[in-house]
Amino acid sequence: MIREANPDDLDLIVELAREAHTGSAWEGLAEFDPDSVREAAQGLIDGEHGTVLVSTRGVLMLARFPLWFNKAETLTTEVFFYATEGGDALRRAGERWADGLIVMCRHAHTDPRLDRLYERAGYRPLEHVFARRV
Protein backbone atom coordinates (compact mmCIF):
# COMPACT_ATOMS: atom_id res chain seq x y z
CA MET A 1 0.00 0.00 0.00
CA ILE A 2 1.24 3.47 -0.90
CA ARG A 3 0.42 6.38 1.38
CA GLU A 4 1.63 9.80 2.38
CA ALA A 5 4.42 9.58 4.91
CA ASN A 6 4.19 10.81 8.48
CA PRO A 7 6.87 11.32 11.16
CA ASP A 8 6.63 7.64 12.13
CA ASP A 9 8.07 6.78 8.68
CA LEU A 10 11.27 8.79 9.07
CA ASP A 11 13.36 5.82 10.22
CA LEU A 12 12.30 3.83 7.14
CA ILE A 13 13.02 6.79 4.87
CA VAL A 14 16.52 7.21 6.34
CA GLU A 15 17.15 3.46 6.04
CA LEU A 16 16.11 3.42 2.37
CA ALA A 17 18.13 6.57 1.64
CA ARG A 18 21.23 5.04 3.22
CA GLU A 19 20.71 1.88 1.15
CA ALA A 20 20.27 3.94 -2.02
CA HIS A 21 23.37 6.05 -1.34
CA THR A 22 25.60 2.99 -1.04
CA GLY A 23 26.93 2.30 -4.51
CA SER A 24 25.18 5.31 -6.04
CA ALA A 25 26.81 8.01 -8.13
CA TRP A 26 26.74 10.23 -5.02
CA GLU A 27 28.98 7.90 -3.02
CA GLY A 28 32.44 9.42 -2.77
CA LEU A 29 31.14 12.79 -3.97
CA ALA A 30 28.93 13.71 -1.01
CA GLU A 31 28.74 12.02 2.37
CA PHE A 32 25.48 10.49 3.53
CA ASP A 33 23.99 12.46 6.44
CA PRO A 34 21.00 10.75 8.05
CA ASP A 35 20.02 13.89 9.96
CA SER A 36 19.82 15.85 6.70
CA VAL A 37 17.67 13.15 5.10
CA ARG A 38 15.36 13.19 8.12
CA GLU A 39 15.13 17.01 8.02
CA ALA A 40 14.48 17.10 4.25
CA ALA A 41 11.76 14.46 4.49
CA GLN A 42 10.13 16.20 7.46
CA GLY A 43 10.15 19.49 5.57
CA LEU A 44 8.36 17.94 2.60
CA ILE A 45 5.87 16.15 4.89
CA ASP A 46 5.08 19.41 6.72
CA GLY A 47 5.21 21.79 3.75
CA GLU A 48 2.41 22.64 1.38
CA HIS A 49 4.59 22.31 -1.74
CA GLY A 50 5.93 18.83 -1.23
CA THR A 51 5.01 15.30 -0.36
CA VAL A 52 6.67 12.07 0.66
CA LEU A 53 5.04 8.84 -0.46
CA VAL A 54 6.04 5.53 1.10
CA SER A 55 5.41 1.86 0.57
CA THR A 56 6.78 -1.15 2.38
CA ARG A 57 10.15 -0.92 0.57
CA GLY A 58 10.06 2.41 -1.24
CA VAL A 59 10.00 6.16 -0.89
CA LEU A 60 9.28 8.98 -3.33
CA MET A 61 9.92 12.55 -2.23
CA LEU A 62 8.49 15.30 -4.47
CA ALA A 63 8.58 19.11 -4.48
CA ARG A 64 6.28 21.36 -6.52
CA PHE A 65 7.01 24.94 -7.60
CA PRO A 66 6.60 27.35 -10.53
CA LEU A 67 8.89 26.63 -13.47
CA TRP A 68 11.66 29.18 -13.07
CA PHE A 69 11.51 30.45 -16.68
CA ASN A 70 7.72 30.26 -17.12
CA LYS A 71 5.78 30.90 -13.92
CA ALA A 72 2.54 29.95 -15.70
CA GLU A 73 3.75 26.33 -15.54
CA THR A 74 3.96 24.22 -12.38
CA LEU A 75 6.85 21.78 -12.09
CA THR A 76 6.93 18.81 -9.74
CA THR A 77 10.37 17.34 -9.35
CA GLU A 78 11.59 14.19 -7.76
CA VAL A 79 13.78 14.97 -4.78
CA PHE A 80 14.52 11.34 -3.96
CA PHE A 81 13.15 8.07 -5.28
CA TYR A 82 14.19 4.59 -4.24
CA ALA A 83 12.19 1.39 -4.20
CA THR A 84 13.22 -2.24 -4.10
CA GLU A 85 9.66 -3.25 -4.95
CA GLY A 86 6.60 -1.41 -6.24
CA GLY A 87 8.51 1.48 -7.77
CA ASP A 88 6.12 1.84 -10.71
CA ALA A 89 3.15 2.15 -8.37
CA LEU A 90 5.03 4.80 -6.35
CA ARG A 91 5.77 6.73 -9.56
CA ARG A 92 2.10 6.62 -10.59
CA ALA A 93 1.03 7.82 -7.14
CA GLY A 94 3.49 10.71 -7.48
CA GLU A 95 2.02 11.58 -10.87
CA ARG A 96 -1.45 11.76 -9.31
CA TRP A 97 -0.12 14.20 -6.69
CA ALA A 98 1.76 16.33 -9.23
CA ASP A 99 0.21 19.30 -10.98
CA GLY A 100 1.51 20.25 -14.43
CA LEU A 101 4.94 19.01 -15.45
CA ILE A 102 6.74 16.25 -13.54
CA VAL A 103 10.45 15.47 -13.68
CA MET A 104 11.82 12.07 -12.68
CA CYS A 105 15.55 11.40 -12.53
CA ARG A 106 18.05 8.59 -12.37
CA HIS A 107 21.67 8.81 -11.35
CA ALA A 108 24.55 7.54 -13.45
CA HIS A 109 24.77 4.15 -11.71
CA THR A 110 21.08 3.28 -12.13
CA ASP A 111 20.29 0.49 -14.55
CA PRO A 112 19.75 2.19 -17.94
CA ARG A 113 16.67 0.02 -18.52
CA LEU A 114 14.89 2.54 -16.28
CA ASP A 115 15.08 4.98 -19.21
CA ARG A 116 12.85 2.69 -21.29
CA LEU A 117 10.37 2.34 -18.42
CA TYR A 118 10.07 6.12 -18.12
CA GLU A 119 9.77 6.55 -21.89
CA ARG A 120 6.99 3.92 -22.02
CA ALA A 121 5.21 5.91 -19.29
CA GLY A 122 5.30 9.03 -21.50
CA TYR A 123 8.45 10.72 -20.19
CA ARG A 124 11.13 12.08 -22.50
CA PRO A 125 14.80 12.73 -21.78
CA LEU A 126 15.38 16.37 -20.92
CA GLU A 127 18.79 17.16 -19.45
CA HIS A 128 21.97 15.49 -18.30
CA VAL A 129 23.55 16.75 -15.09
CA PHE A 130 27.25 16.72 -14.32
CA ALA A 131 28.75 17.29 -10.89
CA ARG A 132 32.17 17.77 -9.35
CA ARG A 133 33.47 19.10 -6.08
CA VAL A 134 35.35 22.42 -6.36
Image (cartoon, rainbow, N blue to C red):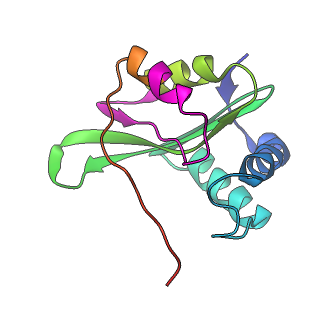
The reply to whether residue 121 is in sight is: no
**Nearest the camera: 70 or 112?**
112
In the picture, the quarter occupied by the N terminus is: top right
Q: Is residue 15 above or below residue 93?
A: below
The part of the chain drawn in magenta is 97-117
Question: Count the marks: how many?
Answer: 0
Q: Is residue 17 above or below residue 85?
A: below
- Residue depicted at x 79% and y 29%: 57
Give residue 107's position: percent from left, percent from top: 55, 47
Based on the displayed image, in which of its 4 quarters is residue 8 positioned?
Answer: top right
Q: Is residue 130 above or below residue 57?
A: below
- Residue depicted at x 27% and y 40%: 74
Based on the displayed image, in which of its 4 quarters is residue 43 positioned?
Answer: bottom right
- Residue depicted at x 35% and y 18%: 122
- Residue depicted at x 54% and y 26%: 113
Q: Is residue 109 magenta?
A: yes
Give residue 97's position: percent from left, percent from top: 46, 27
